[in-house]
Image (cartoon, rainbow, N blue to C red):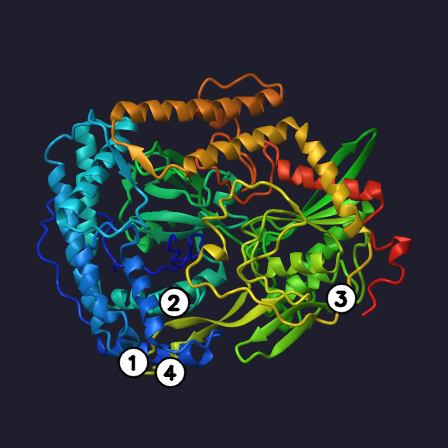
């Protein structure tokens, strides 16, 4: 399973578990691969280690003690974090670490970090060997007329048995790097220069590693062995976390993580430049950064995460250009360059907003209101200080519902796609706008105590037909809202299975326990678990929609179930609630039948499915040819497919075809994550809810049709006579 390290918000700060310390942006041209220094733990880290072990053992939700079984999980995580693609360690190294399999638990308990540093020093030695070998290959131009394949995804491959086997892997990797640059228009001489500098940067950054960096990686191997949302933040990361929460820094509005030698986009922040551009997408990899419209592109492959961040950050209104390897594309595939204008990402930019979609059924038109909620936000300080108009999701949604009612809509869609959660209080309050007073979520602590949260709204703000549109990036508090609407039978949930994050975290200042110099960092600790009112957990399984829509998002890459050591799904007793009787249960088969018939004759839907087909075909590729002529042929074929799809969308709008992908890209941009961005070879699109005039948001359009079906059938309304006795609790 692909490793998922800590994320950072480029718009607002850095937050990352990395392998190296601060470094200059580029290595000196004459870097010499001198032996790397041996790293050893520091006394402060011993105290922090013992403190973290004590807190996790006592207060983590799973209450898992340090044991031989946990020791094996920690070792597995640590090795995967260091060498996720199995490109450095040898099988003999792994065998040499075998004694640690059942002893890391004792070492952590005793504050003994020597095993962790011993493993890391072996890793550093292997990294330097690979860098030296890669540099040696650049002395001669490779033969690109020899057949061969490069397997670029090795996270499940066996460890190499010998240096010769690793040499073979790396010779193919270097050849693939060369081909990628040649396909981008570079000459062999230029490609060799770029790659020499890149590999020298690997070595240069390896030399900046400090003991605290090794400690960070090892501690997170421990915390992630308990669950993927429990994290250790170093002092520097703790400071960045505070910046992140304050939403103050200017940037592009993207959450990035470090994965192998790449900086990868984890998610797009609503309201930021990346979301507005529709050109940067989850799973894209940033390979180069340039300042302004004319600055040189700096190759950042192999850079540490916070060094990449420093290049991307900048003053509001300034331009940054990013070189992108699209999501799903193999290393060495054609890249693209996007232009973004930095700006501050503010809470207001993430506020709920509305629009109206008019859909036609037979001879009648239906006005369907759409409220997009990017996150469940609240100004806690304003609320605590008694401000009259403090910012609140529930207040905003209530106001938007009143405006839609005044416009006489026939139904409402709540769009929660890409909503990663936020305030549980606000999710509960928003739920109360649609249901009579009652329980919304159950919260269980590590000791088995269950607290039931009710909505506090005095009355229902909207009584008409309702659908909730979700996708794989709908998570946490937004899953609670969708689950409650589904459990109360208040509306129809439409889309794809949600993320499945059903846990609650708290932040602990470790300086309270290690008071020496105020430099111990913080621990983000999983303490509670969410449960629906029907008793089922949202953890791991998420929320399954009543009507499933196909998605461009790969469920095998994203979601709680893809995370190693995620807490399991389970069930507790249901809360005391009464489902509503709005006719939806009996109408669901008919709604599904109408949906199926409609999409079968929908030309836009067929193009959307073709976009998914192209993307899945690309995802299925696990290796890539090292024959230059074959790669050129593959590139041309992929370009023809994407151009054909882009032009099919243009024909649908009565527009003339574009002559090239570049022209098509200038003429249109893709929309939401589940919209078919034809020009984007990666397929996963940005979080903006704004539809392109050329490529429609077919999932939102279809959800609006489903709500219109509900209105036409006379179901889903609280004002219906059949609901007169419903909702009493």
Name the front one of labels 3 and 2: 2
Q: Is residue 691 left or right of residue 22?
A: right
Residue occupying the point 91% across, 54% down = 721
Q: Nearer the viewer, residue 98 or 398?
A: 98
- Label 3 or label 2, whichever comes before in sequence order: 2
**Cα–Cα span, label 4 and label 2:** 23 Å
Name the residue carrying label 2: 225
Cα distance in 3D space between marks 4 and 3: 41 Å
Q: Specify whether residue 322 is in view.
A: yes
Q: CA distance from mark 2 to mark 1?
A: 20 Å
Q: Name the element at disc 4.
A: loop
> Is there a contact, CB below 8 Å, between mark 4 and mark 3?
no
Query: Alpha-carbon distance for marks 1 and 3?
Result: 48 Å
Q: Which mark is residue 457?
A: 3
Dot 1 or dot 3, earlier in sequence: 1
Q: Residues within 10 Å of mark 3 (few under 14, many from 20)?
A: some
Which residue, given by chain and number where applicable, does mark 4 sit on?
A: 513
Q: Quadrant of residue 16?
A: bottom left
Secondary element at tag 2: helix
Which one is in front, 537 or 28? 537
Q: In front: 102, or 563?
A: 102
Residue bearing the label numbered 1:
47
The foreground one among 152 and 276 is 152
* Dot placed on the residue nearer the N-terminal end, 4 or 3: 3
**Quadrant of image for the C terminus:** bottom right
Q: Is residue 295 left or right of residue 659?
A: left
Secondary structure under tag 3 reads: loop
């Amino acid at each position: 399973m692909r490793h998922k390290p800590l994320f950072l918000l480029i718009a607002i700060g850095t937050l990352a578990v990395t392998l190296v310390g601060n470094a200059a942006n580029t290595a000196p041209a004459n870097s010499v691969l001198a032996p790397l220094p041996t790293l050893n733990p520091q006394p402060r880290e011993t105290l922090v280690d013992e403190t973290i072990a004590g807190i996790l053992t006592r207060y983590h939700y799973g209450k898992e003690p340090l044991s031989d079984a946990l020791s094996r999980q920690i070792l597995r995580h640590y090795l995967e974090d260091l060498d996720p693609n199995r490109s450095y360690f040898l099988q003999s190294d792994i065998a040499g670490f075998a004694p640690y399999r059942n002893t890391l638990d004792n070492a952590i308990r005793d504050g003994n970090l020597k095993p962790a540093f011993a493993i890391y020093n072996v890793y550093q030695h292997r990294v330097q060997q690979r860098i030296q070998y890669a540099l040696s290959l650049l002395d001669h131009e490779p033969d690109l007329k020899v057949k061969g394949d490069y397997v670029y995804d090795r996270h499940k491959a066996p460890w190499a048995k010998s240096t010769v086997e690793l040499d073979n892997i790396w010779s193919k990797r270097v050849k693939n790097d060369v081909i990628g640059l040649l396909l981008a228009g570079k000459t062999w001489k230029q490609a060799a220069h770029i790659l020499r500098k890149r590999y020298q940067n690997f070595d240069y950054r390896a030399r900046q590693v400090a003991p605290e960096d090794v400690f960070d990686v090892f501690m997170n191997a421990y915390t992630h062995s308990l669950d993927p949302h429990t994290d250790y933040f170093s002092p520097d990361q703790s400071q960045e976390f505070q910046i992140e929460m304050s939403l103050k820094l200017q940037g592009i509005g993207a959450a990035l993580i470090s994965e192998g030698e790449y900086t990868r986009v984890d998610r797009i922040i609503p309201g930021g430049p990346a979301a507005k551009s529709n050109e940067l997408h989850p799973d894209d990899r940033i390979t180069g950064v340039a300042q302004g419209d004319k600055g040189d592109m700096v190759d950042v492959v192999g850079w540490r995460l916070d060094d990449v961040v420093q290049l991307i950050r900048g003053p509001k209104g300034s331009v940054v250009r990013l070189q992108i390897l699209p999501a799903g594309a193999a290393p060495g595939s054609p890249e693209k360059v996007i232009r973004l204008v930095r700006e501050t990402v503010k809470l207001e930019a993430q506020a709920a907003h509305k629009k109206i979609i008019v859909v036609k059924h037979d001879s009648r038109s239906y006005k369907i209101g759409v409220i997009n909620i990017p996150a469940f936000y609240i100004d806690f300080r304003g609320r605590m200080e008694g401000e009259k108009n403090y910012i609140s999701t529930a207040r905003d949604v209530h106001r938007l519902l009143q405006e839609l009612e005044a416009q006489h809509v026939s139904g409402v869609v709540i769009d929660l796609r890409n909503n990663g959660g936020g305030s549980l209080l606000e999710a509960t309050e928003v739920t109360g706008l649609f249901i009579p007073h009652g329980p919304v979520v159950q919260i269980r602590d590590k000791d088995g105590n269950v607290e039931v949260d009710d909505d506090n709204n005095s009355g229902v703000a909207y009584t008409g037909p309702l659908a909730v549109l979700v996708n794989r990036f709908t998570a946490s508090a937004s899953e609670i809202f969708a689950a409650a609407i589904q459990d109360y039978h208040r509306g129809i949930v439409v889309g794809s299975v949600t993320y499945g994050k059903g846990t609650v975290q708290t932040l602990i200042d470790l300086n309270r326990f290690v008071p020496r110099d105020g430099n111990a960092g913080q621990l983000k600790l999983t303490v509670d678990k969410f449960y629906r009112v029907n008793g089922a957990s949202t953890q791991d399984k998420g929320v399954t929609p009543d009507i499933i829509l196909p998605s461009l998002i790969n469920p095998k890459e994203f979601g709680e179930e893809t995370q190693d050591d995620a807490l399991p799904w389970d069930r507790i007793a249901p809360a005391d609630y009464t489902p509503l009787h709005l006719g939806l249960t009996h109408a669901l088969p008919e709604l599904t039948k109408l949906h199926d018939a409609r999409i079968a004759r929908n030309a836009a839907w067929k193009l959307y499915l073709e976009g998914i087909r192209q993307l899945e075909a690309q995802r299925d590729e696990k290796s890539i040819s090292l024959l230059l002529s074959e790669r050129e042929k593959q590139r041309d074929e992929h370009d023809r497919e994407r151009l054909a799809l882009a032009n099919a969308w243009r024909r649908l709008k009565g527009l003339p075809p574009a002559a090239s992908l570049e022209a098509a890209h200038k003429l249109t941009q893709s929309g939401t994550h589940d919209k078919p961005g034809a020009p984007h070879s990666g397929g996963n699109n940005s979080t903006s809810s704004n539809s392109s005039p050329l490529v429609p948001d077919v999932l939102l359009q279809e959800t609006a049709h489903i709500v219109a079906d509900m209105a036409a059938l006379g179901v889903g309304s609280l004002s219906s006579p059949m609901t007169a006795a419903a909702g009493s609790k």
